[in-house]
Image (tube, rainbow, N blue to C red):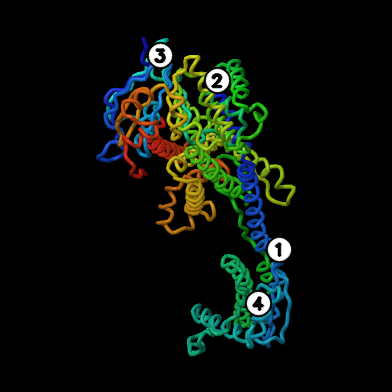
């Protein structure tokens, strides 16, 4: 039986004094080993939800429960098992790829030996070995995107949150990233993913939540949702459920 | 791997990658201290050691004009060029377009008018003493007050130098007038001249002035331009770390690195602490370099050397607190500024204002009282007060208490508001 790894109950988020919540009563259960997609138009609340799940933002009300295998004692230990790959590049451009990985792995508290091993491994898998000692500011967009992913995975987390991990990269980088995520998932890593590339999401995700106006408006496997809503694909499904109006 | 260690390594690597920032942090204070000290030292020498170029136009038909010139030459303060044929309008041109900073026009009848004044005063004195009766007194005559010397000066000459030069000329004039007065007095009493033994005594300067700087104990610290400038401009440069550190914080915040750190337990506070430690080290290195240059390099450049205070522990404590105040202020700017430009612009201007009102550029005591009161809010004021207490007065802990309390309060205030902002943004 599938065991939940994240459970949210009645999650609300208000920004400042806004009357309308950015997240409106989110009740979700994400299971261990899932490739879970969160989709929706701009302003639907996807990034806010991920920010809450990663502890970047605090919820106005509601609870988030993490359930790891080894029953981590406190929230700090639990969050140490979470990896975050933000949409924006989150590293130090003045440092080299290796220095960035050493730094972020170090602050996760990794031992020196496992940090070095994991750094070599990730650089190899993501095709960055030849530029490992180059300053990141000299990298191409695809290389930066792959490094951004590598940093989020350096400590081998149980859950990885990916916010648009393939945005702005060429097909080769995209394939490398997606293939590696598939490989990680096979090893048991739970992947929570947002993207505007709905075809990519359709192929990649095992289950999706469609969001609009801060609410989850549909939640199921991609194939089931397409079938129930009589749509040809995820793109058509999204248009059917959220309308054709422009969202900013 | 130790989390603090990797954070420190990261901060050091970032600092080393910012070559311009490093250059600013170490070369700028060096240049500032060197230039300001040379300028102030030269200004001091201009008035006190170098001879000032002076043009004299002597229209006097008596001999006191020549006496005045002789005495000015003897004073050793002036390089005098005499050109008696020049007209008033030409004197102005000479001071404006030639290298003569000042010129004096001795008017016609200069000697005659001084003589008349001396005669009048002598007569009044003798009448007062009852040596002559009032019927012989010159009551109807008035003291001549139109025997003014005209003093021309190049407008570039600053007021304090001008006043200093005028004071020197005035001293020579008073000497001449006193002598003429005495001569007249003796003449009125029937002497041909002032008796030689009295002239001899009058020629002596019996009272000399010893300058004694007020300081504690048996200190031999003598205030000089290095004692003032090295600590003052080192502090000024140290607070300029707001551009580097404040900008660095904004950059990390905007680049997304901070967002990633938010997801890593304790990482954010570690990052802040590693910044504090690295920049504390940088600040203390800045001060050490500056002080060493003041002590060992300045004497070879003809500048006064920096003498260290006897209480080295107090110097260390004040330096740490000053550096920590600069770091705390930089972090505060870094967390509140929305862009790097904002942090750099506001940070730099605020430090210039703090320096101006805090007495780094001009001493606080010459400012109006309200400005002195406003200056108390400047952390630079308290830092420099602490250094002056040590470097100029050889002060002890008790005299440093005000400085220590203020700096601690300033640090606490900056950190409190930094904490509030970071807390509000859920970073900590």
First of labels 2, 1 by sequence position: 2
Query: Taking A51 as reference, is B407 above or below it?
Result: below
The answer to whether tags 1 and 3 share a subunit is: no
SS for callout 4: helix
Q: CA distance from mark 2 to mark 1?
A: 62 Å
Provide the residue designation for mark 1. Answer: B50
Task: Report crowding for label 2: few under 14, some 14 to 19, many 20 or more residues within 10 A (C-alpha).
Answer: few
The answer to whether tags 2 and 3 share a subunit is: no
Viewed as shown, does residue B313 lie left or right of A44? right
SS for callout 2: loop
Residue situated in front as seen by the camera: B296 or B307: B296
Labels 1 and 3 touching (C-beta < 8 A): no
Give the quarter of the figure containing the N terminus of chain B. Answer: top right
Chain letter of disc 1?
B
The answer to whether tags 3 and 4 share a subunit is: no
Q: CA distance from mark 1 to mark 3?
A: 83 Å
Provide the residue designation for mark 4. Answer: B96
Q: Position of residue A167 (x, y in %)?
A: 50, 36
Q: Position of residue A147 (x, y in %)?
A: 57, 30
Any part of residue B15 in sight:
no
| Foreground: disc 4 or disc 1 | 4
Provide the residue designation for mark 2. Answer: B2
Q: Which mark is residue A68?
A: 3
The answer to whether tags 2 and 1 share a subunit is: yes
SS for callout 1: loop
């Amino acid at each position: 039986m599938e065991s939940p790894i994240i459970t949210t109950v009645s999650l609300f988020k208000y920004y400042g004094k806004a009357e309308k919540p950015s997240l409106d009563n989110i009740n979700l259960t994400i299971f261990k080993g899932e490739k879970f997609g969160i989709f929706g138009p701009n302003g639907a609340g996807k990034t806010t939800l991920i920010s809450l799940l990663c502890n970047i933002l605090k919820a106005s009300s509601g609870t988030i429960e993490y359930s790891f295998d080894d029953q981590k004692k406190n929230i700090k230990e639990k969050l140490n098992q979470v990896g975050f790959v933000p949409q924006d590049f989150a590293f130090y451009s003045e440092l080299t790829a290796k220095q960035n990985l050493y730094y972020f792995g170090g602050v996760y508290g990794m031992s020196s030996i496992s940090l070095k091993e994991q750094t070599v491994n990730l650089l190899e898998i993501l095709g960055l070995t030849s530029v490992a000692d180059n300053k990141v500011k000299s990298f191409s967009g695809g290389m930066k995107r792959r490094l951004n992913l590598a940093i989020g995975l350096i400590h081998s987390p149980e859950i990885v949150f990916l916010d648009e991990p393939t945005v702005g990269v060429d097909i080769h980088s995209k394939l490398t990233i997606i293939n590696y995520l598939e490989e990680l998932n096979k090893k048991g890593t739970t992947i929570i993913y947002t993207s505007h590339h709905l075809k990519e999401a359709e192929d990649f995700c095992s289950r999706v939540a469609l969001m609009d106006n801060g609410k989850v408006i549909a939640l199921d496997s991609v194939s089931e949702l397409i079938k129930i809503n009589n749509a040809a694909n995820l793109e058509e499904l999204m248009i059917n459920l959220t309308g054709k109006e422009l969202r900013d | 791997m130790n989390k603090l260690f990797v954070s420190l390594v990261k901060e050091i690597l970032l600092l080393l990658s910012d070559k311009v920032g490093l250059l600013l942090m170490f070369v700028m204070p060096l240049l500032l201290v060197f230039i300001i000290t040379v300028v102030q030292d030269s200004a001091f020498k201009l008035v006190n050691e170098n001879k000032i170029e002076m043009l004299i136009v002597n229209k006097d038909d008596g001999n006191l004009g020549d006496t005045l010139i002789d005495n000015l030459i003897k004073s050793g303060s002036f390089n005098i060029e005499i050109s008696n044929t020049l007209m008033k309008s030409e004197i102005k041109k000479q001071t404006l377009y030639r290298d003569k900073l000042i010129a004096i026009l001795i008017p016609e009848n200069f000697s005659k008018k001084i003589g008349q004044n001396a005669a009048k005063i002598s007569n009044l004195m003798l009448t007062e003493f009852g040596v002559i009766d009032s019927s012989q007194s010159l009551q109807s005559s008035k003291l001549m007050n139109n025997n003014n010397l005209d003093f021309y000066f190049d407008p570039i000459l600053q007021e304090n130098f001008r006043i200093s030069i005028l004071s020197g000329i005035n001293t020579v004039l008073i000497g001449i007038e006193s002598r003429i007065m005495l001569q007249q007095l003796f003449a009125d009493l029937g002497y041909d001249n002032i008796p030689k033994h009295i002239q001899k005594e009058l020629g002596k300067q019996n009272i000399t002035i010893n300058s004694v700087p007020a300081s504690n104990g048996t200190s031999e610290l003598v205030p000089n331009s290095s004692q003032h400038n090295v600590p003052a401009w080192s502090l000024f440069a140290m607070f300029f770390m707001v551009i580097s550190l404040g900008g660095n914080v904004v950059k990390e915040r905007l680049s997304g690195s901070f967002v990633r750190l938010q997801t890593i337990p304790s990482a954010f506070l570690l990052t802040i602490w590693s910044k504090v430690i690295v920049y504390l080290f940088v600040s203390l290195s800045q001060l050490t370099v500056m002080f060493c240059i003041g002590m060992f390099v300045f004497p070879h450049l003809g500048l006064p050397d920096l003498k260290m205070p006897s209480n080295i522990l107090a110097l260390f404590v004040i330096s740490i607190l000053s550096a920590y105040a600069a770091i705390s202020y930089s972090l505060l700017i870094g967390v509140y500024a929305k862009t790097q430009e904002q942090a750099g612009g506001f940070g730099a201007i605020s430090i210039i204002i703090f320096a101006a009102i805090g007495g780094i550029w001009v001493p606080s005591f010459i400012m109006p009282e309200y400005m002195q009161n406003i200056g108390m809010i400047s952390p630079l004021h308290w830092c420099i007060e602490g250094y002056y207490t040590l470097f100029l007065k050889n002060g002890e802990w008790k005299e440093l208490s005000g400085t220590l309390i203020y700096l601690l309060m300033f640090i606490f205030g900056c950190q409190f508001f930094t904490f509030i902002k970071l807390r509000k943004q859920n970073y900590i």
